[in-house]
Image (tube, rainbow, N blue to C red):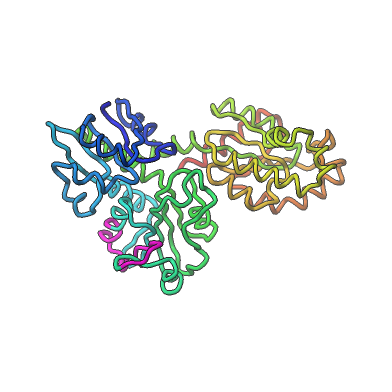
Amino acid sequence: MRYGLIGEKLGHSFSKIIHEQLADYTYDLIPLSKEFFHTFMAQKDFSAINVTIPYKEMVIPYLDCIDPKAEAIGAVNTIVHRNHMLYGYNTDYDGFRYMLVKHKINPKGKKVLLLGKGGAAKACISVVRDMGAKEVLTVYYKENPETISYETCYQTHTDAEIIINTTPVGMYPNTKESPIRLTAFDKLEAVVDVVYNPLRTKFVLEGLSKGVIAVGGLEMLIGQAKCAVEIFLGKKMEDSIIQNLYATLLAERSNLVLIGMSGCGKTALGKMAAERLGKAFIDVDEEIVKEINMPIQEYFSKMGEPAFREIEKSVVQKLSQLNNLVISTGGGVIKDAENIASLKQNGRIVWIKRAVSLLESGNGRPLTPNPEATLRLYQERLPLYSAASEIISENNLSLEKGLDELLYQYTQSFVK
């Protein structure tokens, strides 16, 4: 083994994909238990590795030389094996700083709350201090001389302007969790999450809904990987490669989520879009039928709409944790805000907007038995579709033109 990543749990990691895009080598994911970690480090059977939770501090005693920046931070995420010696570096610092600058998040003169106190937290603290933060407070579930508790945070520090999450709270598969209540902070300007799976955590989405700058950790991950590759191979790379790879990965990993009235063309457009984009197509209603083992109309008749919506929510939650899908939703999925929040974590939500006169009715659809009912339903749901969608794509002409419009709008959403 020459290159790779060590950590305790790596099932969520994008690092293999990123490194093999950045450089011409095979990059392995090496999950290590705490018991085997020490054996691995003592054997030194690698050319270069990256280090993630929980070993960024535990690797330090095994190093022969440590870069001054990494030593000052107190955490190492990059190790190179040269001439029988181990050299340690910290590229989390570089990746995090790149992300702040890219999104115009300037800590200078600001009060910053940093959630967590692991290796990533140490790098982030160094960055915001070096960028001139007025005050940096570490929030931890156990208060000690170096940290404050969440209770103290809510009591005394709701004037924080920047909040940075370095904990794993909200990471896949626990995507419904958020590390802190953002509603308590009335002077907030930006939130940053080092978690990158899901692409937008609940914490990030809550920041966006609050109207502040909100950034997930994928750009930091790519930025630190680029710097690690430079150290591994001893050559410089342009920063532009970070944004190019970020846009590519975001488009590949994101789900294209279609919402809209029954009969607007979600299924037909979704299947065509999936083929063009190289994504798998999933119809939420078809997944629900697998769960209930009967036609949806029959289930509506027997169990009622509330019971159906609970099944729908469960299916949506499962699908939302997956990547690289085109998801066609049922017409009423937007009635539950939790559905939309779940779908946004790994997806871009597109409203397929079609003139009411062109919508199909009947055909076994449980809520649209006739044109008049369709119009009433459309008027009822119009504000919900508008609020939930991030992109609007018209589908009033041919399917081919509708597909072209959909793909254009979707791909443009990744161009910044």
Seen as rendered, the residue at the extreme front is: 35
Up/down of 100 relative to 237, above or below: below
Of 303 and 111, which appears nearest the observer? 303
Seen as rendered, the residue at the extreme bottom is: 156
Of 75 and 96, which appears nearest the observer? 75
Task: Tell me: 26 left or right of 151.
Answer: left
Q: Position of residue 71 (x, y in %)?
A: 19, 51
| 199 drawn magenta | no
Q: Who's the residue at 36% across and 30% down the image?
A: 21
Of 308 and 135, which appears nearest the observer? 308
In the figure, residue 401 lies in which quadrant?
top right
Q: Position of residue 341 (x, y in %)?
A: 59, 50
Up/down of 113 relative to 26, above or below: below
| 131 drawn magenta | yes
Of 302 and 219, which appears nearest the observer? 302
Q: Position of residue 161 (x, y in %)?
A: 41, 66
Up/down of 324 relative to 337, above or below: above
Task: Tell me: 254 left or right of 193.
Answer: right
**Quadrant showing the C terminus:** top left
**Quadrant showing the N terminus:** top left
In the figure, residue 108 lies in which quadrant?
bottom left
Up/down of 143 relative to 127, above or below: below
Residue range highlighted in magenta: 126-144
Q: Who's the residue at 34% across and 63% down the image?
A: 138
Q: Position of residue 232 (x, y in %)?
A: 23, 34
Q: Who's the residue at 52% across and 57% down the image?
A: 206
Task: Tell me: 348 left or right of 66.
Answer: right
How many numbered dots are placed on residues in this image?
Answer: 0
Q: Who's the residue at 82% across and 50% down the image?
A: 376
